[in-house]
Amino acid sequence: MNGSVLPLDYAETADRDEFRRAVIAGLSARPRAIPAKFLYDARGSALFDEICELPEYYLTRTETMILSQRAGEIGRRAGPGCALVEFGSGSSVKSRLLIEALPDLALYAPIDISRAHLDATAARLRRDYPWLQVLPVCADFMGPVPPIVHDGRLLGFFPGSTIGNLEPPEATAFLRHARRLLGNDGALVLGVDLRKDPQRLHDAYNDKAGVTAAFTLNLLRRMNRELHATFDLSGFAHEASYNPVDGRIEIYFRSLRDQSVTVAGQRFDFAAGERVHTEYSYKYDTSGIAALAKSGGFRIAETWTDPDRLFAVTYLEAA
């Protein structure tokens, strides 16, 4: 692992500059859109952890069940002495199942864009697994990531159906990037949400407690805080619906009235009903997973699902 670390104030300034550029570009475009990765500041990451506990949000508990049942098989496939590299680690709850199942695990490298969340997670893991070398990497896993220096196999971990947040060309680009990082002997454990009843999908992204809505609108709070924006959160609403043609959940924040907002010194007018796209969540079938893996330079070695076939965990090997 590259040991160089940017000073915190420099890194925070760079992160904020990237955020400002992306927001200004996204609000100036038609249709308007802001990349989903900016949902995950410290508060957004904490809200997402709450979403994962909601009764409507089957994804986390279903994937966790599969991983709990199959962690031993994953460990046997990976072999002894590997390093675990998690893309978009969040709180690393599911990674603990693999940490405890991988024989003689030498290194855990979580990659996440939220510095505060990443540091807190790394501290907890070092406390709970004092024998494990934990090297957190604060980076956008879609961009340049320092090489992971390790003598043994690198096992990537990309859970939570985060692959579904990427449009197909982006998903292919990510897999190709992961393939290069993990090397010719590398493997990737990938969590993928499967296509299913549209009502179940709708409920998962429109929970009764309103946590998902708070997660979406937290992006407006972040713009107010970091970019001196003037969003009135009562004038916007979370909107999520399933697009059966493209097989994806589409998430927006929607203006409830005609209004103007200033962001980083620039004025933006919103018409009543106008939407700003924040996130997609693609759902796959088995043939789609196979095609995606192939496009990224992997092949499927094994696929595990739950009895209701809500979710799939796949073990991909470098092709």
Image: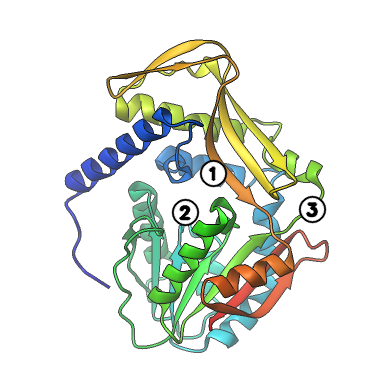
**Amino acid marked by disc 3:** Lys
**Residue at mark 3:** 196
Tell me residue 312's x, y (percent).
Answer: 69, 66
Tell me residue 124's x, y (percent).
Answer: 41, 59
Report helix, strand or loop for mark 3: loop
Label 2 CA crowd tier, 10 Å (few <14, some 14–19, many 20+): many
Nearer to the camera, 92 or 13: 13
Sequence-first tag of 3 and 2: 2
Q: Residue at x 57, y 57 (%)?
A: 168
Q: Find the distance from the CA under tag 1 to the CA under tag 3.
A: 22 Å
Report helix, strand or loop for mark 1: helix
**Amino acid marked by disc 1:** Phe
**Residue at mark 2:** 90
**Residue at mark 1:** 48
Q: Confirm or deny contact between disc 3 and disc 2 (CB under 8 A).
A: no
Query: Is residue 207 positioned above or below 139 on the image?
Result: above
Label 3 CA crowd tier, 10 Å (few <14, some 14–19, many 20+): some
Residue 129, label in figure: none
